[in-house]
């Protein structure tokens, strides 16, 4: 089970956003972050906990291992308004998504 | 980057089979996984499964027995079949590619296809 917090994050442009994802048991580094915007194709941001996918701006970073992971947006841009999901891969392998964090502009 | 596009019926009757196709802009590359993910208000995002040309299929245990993913390399397409659907299967269905980064995380997605289960 993956638990994301907060459910909603309201910040001003330029502020730092920290999104949390907690696994119910240790998963090593097998975690990804995705960005979902209405009407757009979903986008992979981070894979294996901390590696940025191609074309992802440097303000996005991922950290963590084991059970606790974070996605950080260092300086929020208006185009970062979206819902962000984490996803884990376990040993079977099976993949599970978290419930999402909606990022809003204050 | 490869482009993916879902197609298929937007309405399926309960107990019938949901069938969707994903068309690729480029030819298949055999070392990727190709599969499906869905999103519904009740269940959130749910991984359905992947098919790899040589490794075979990996399915979500909660759907195993009802789901089949198959590849058609001659048409640059792959498909999803989900049998005995109920209203709980109403969702946006995304096709996706995984494996570009050596993991099972979806690095390319289609825009999604809404499928409603209703009589």
Image: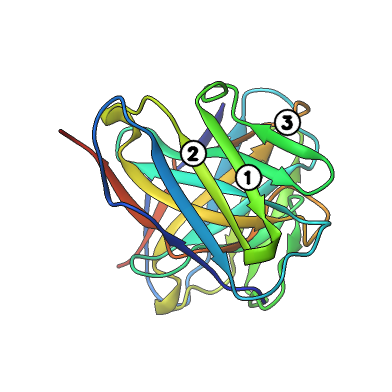
Instruction: Return the residue at label 2.
Output: B81
In the image, which is nearer the foreground, mark 3 or mark 2?
2
Q: Residue at x 84, y 45 (%)?
A: B54
A60 above or below A31?
below
Pick the quarter of the image with the N terminus of chain A. Answer: top right
Label 2 environment density (alpha carbons within 10 Å; few <14, some 14–19, many ≥20): some
Q: Are marks 1 and 3 on the same chain?
A: no
Q: Nearer the viewer, residue A67 or A90?
A: A90
Instruction: Return the residue at label 3.
Output: A90
- Asked if the residues shown at circle 2 and circle 1 are in contact, with their CB atoms under 8 angstroms apart, the answer is yes
Q: Chain of mark 3?
A: A
A76 above or below B81?
below
Where residue A98 sits: x, y (%)?
Answer: 51, 39
Whether residue A98 is visible, yes or no, is: no
Pick the quarter of the image with the C terminus of chain A. Answer: bottom left
Q: Nearer the viewer, residue A59 or B100?
A: B100
């Amino acid at each position: 089970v993956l638990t994301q917090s907060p459910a909603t994050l309201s910040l001003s442009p330029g502020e730092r956003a920290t999104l949390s994802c907690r696994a119910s048991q240790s998963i090593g580094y097998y975690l990804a972050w995705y960005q979902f915007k209405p009407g757009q194709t979903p986008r992979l941001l981070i894979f294996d906990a901390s590696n940025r996918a191609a074309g992802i701006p440097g303000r996005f970073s991922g950290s963590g291992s084991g059970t606790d992971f974070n996605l950080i947006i260092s300086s929020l841009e208006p185009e970062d308004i979206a819902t962000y999901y984490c996803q884990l891969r376990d040993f079977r392998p099976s993949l599970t998504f978290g419930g999402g964090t909606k990022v809003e502009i204050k | 980057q490869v482009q993916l596009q879902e197609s298929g019926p937007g309405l399926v009757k309960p107990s019938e089979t949901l069938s969707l196709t994903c068309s690729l802009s480029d030819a298949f590359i055999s070392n990727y996984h190709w599969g499906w993910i869905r999103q519904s208000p009740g269940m959130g995002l749910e991984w359905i499964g992947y098919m790899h040309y040589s490794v075979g299929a990996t399915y979500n245990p909660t759907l195993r027995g009802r789901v089949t993913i198959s590849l058609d390399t001659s048409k640059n397409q792959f498909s999803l079949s989900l049998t005995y659907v109920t209203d709980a299967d109403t969702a946006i269905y995304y096709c996706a590619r995984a494996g570009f980064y050596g993991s099972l995380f979806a690095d390319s997605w289609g825009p999604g296809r809404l499928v409603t289960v209703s009589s």
